[in-house]
Structure formats: C-alpha cells, structure tokens
Image (spheres, rainbow, N blue to C red):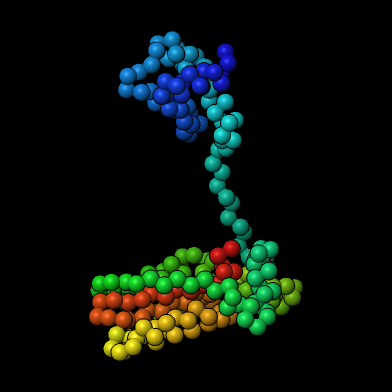
Amino acid sequence: MNIELLLAELRNNNVKLAIKEDKLICILPDAGIDQGLLNLLKEHKEEIKKTIEEKTNFKKYQAIEKSPEMEHYPLSPSQKRLWMLSQFEGGSQAYNMSYAIKLKGELPVIFFEKSFKELIAYHEVLRTVFKVDNETQEVRQFIVPANEVDFTISQIDFSSESNHSEKLNHFINEKINEEFNLENAPLVRASLIKIAAREHIFLFSMHHIISD
C-alpha cells in the first residue's frame, strides 16, 4: 500500500491527522468517510503514524537538564562580545533595551514594585552579573542571591509641571542612556513617572547581555 497516496486521499476527504502522546489521532468529518477508506485507515494506522513522524521530523519531548550549581558560569559567545564592548566608553549604554508604556487608572505602587521584586527573585538571569573571577582571571557569570539584590522603582511627579512634556522627554532620554555597571545586580531598572492624577508613564530598561 502506498501510504503517501493514502494520506492524500485522507486529506481530500477532510480527515485530520495528528500525533499526540505517541498515538495517531484521527478526526473524521461530520459526514464520515467511505467504509473502504476507513478500513484502510485502520489497517495502516502504524504506517501512517510513522510517515507523519518522518515528514514532520517528530521528536519526543525531552526536558532540558538543569545545569549543576556552581559558584559562577561561563559566558556565551554573544555575552563575551557584549562584555568586551562594554569596556569601551559608551559601549555599555549602546546595548540598553528600554520600553515606555502609559498606564491609566489607580496604581498601587507598593504592589506594583513588589511584583517586580518577586519576578527578579524568581528569574536567576535578572540577578546575574558579569565580572572577572579572581582565580581564573576570566569573565564569568555570577548569580546574586535574591536577598542581596536592591531593586526599587524610582518615582517622579511631573503632573503639576506646566511644560511636563519637555521635562518628561528629557528625563526619559537620560534614563534610557544611563549606563549599567555589569558587575552590579540587577541589570534592570524601572521608573514610574506621574503625568496626571490617574496617569503614569512606566519606563523599564535592561541590558542586552541578560537577554541572550
């Protein structure tokens, strides 16, 4: 039996085929299909499954093993390049990644900041710094314990300023061009700028080296 021709016939009859948990799943159209075609489907089920696996390069899910815990870790090639560039004047700030978004409505700042602190505590990459190891004299990644990371959202109020647009733009430009010290965590910073009674601009920046 030519399985390719059988698959083409099944498609022409609107039969949906998929593989789930190593099993072939067949979804027939509401009107059903010809009994002869149905018999062929049942008879060649394993061959159809194998052909679909080969065509889609199907692979079973394999969990990525967690790296063993170490005092520090090697840099990826991309991180090495970014670290080298950061050693030149202006090289670090060139790789700042910044985002600004307007928030409207009541904003419980305490809980807003707390959510970011929990995010930083959960994701090790947000607590990673890059510095020279004293023994090897190589630049390595060091993960700072969550309780040693000092993160706060800076707050500024421009809501009462008559020309707050100009001052806002100036403040944002300063913040997005502020250099990160790659040896100090976290390599993220955030500002909350009040521009009206129920309106804020949330400005968030991170260094590209921790997004690798």
In the displayed structure, 143 sits above or below 48; it is: below
Residue 72 at least partly seen: no
Residue 12, quarter of the rendered image: top left
Which residue sits at x=51%, y=21%?
7
Residue 69 at least partly seen: yes
Which residue sits at x=28%, y=88%?
160
The answer to whether residue 30 is left or right of residue 61 is left
**Viewer-closest of 87 and 20:** 87
The answer to whether residue 201 is left or right of residue 151 is left
- Quadrant of the drawing holding the N terminus: top right
- Residue 146: give x, y in percent of width and height: 49, 72
- Looking at the image, the residue that sits furthest to the top is 36
Total numbered badges shown on the rendered structure:
0
Residue 166, quarter of the rendered image: bottom left
In the displayed structure, 28 sits above or below 206; it is: above
Which residue sits at x=42%, y=75%?
203
**Viewer-closest of 190 and 148:** 190
The answer to whether residue 133 is left or right of residue 46 is right
- Residue 153: give x, y in percent of width and height: 40, 79
- Residue 4: give x, y in percent of width and height: 56, 21
- Residue 107: give x, y in percent of width and height: 28, 74
In the displayed structure, 181 sits above or below 47; it is: below
- Quadrant of the drawing holding the C terminus: bottom right
**Viewer-closest of 113 and 173:** 173
Residue 106, quarter of the rendered image: bottom left
- Looking at the image, the residue that sits furthest to the right is 136
**Viewer-closest of 123 and 58:** 58
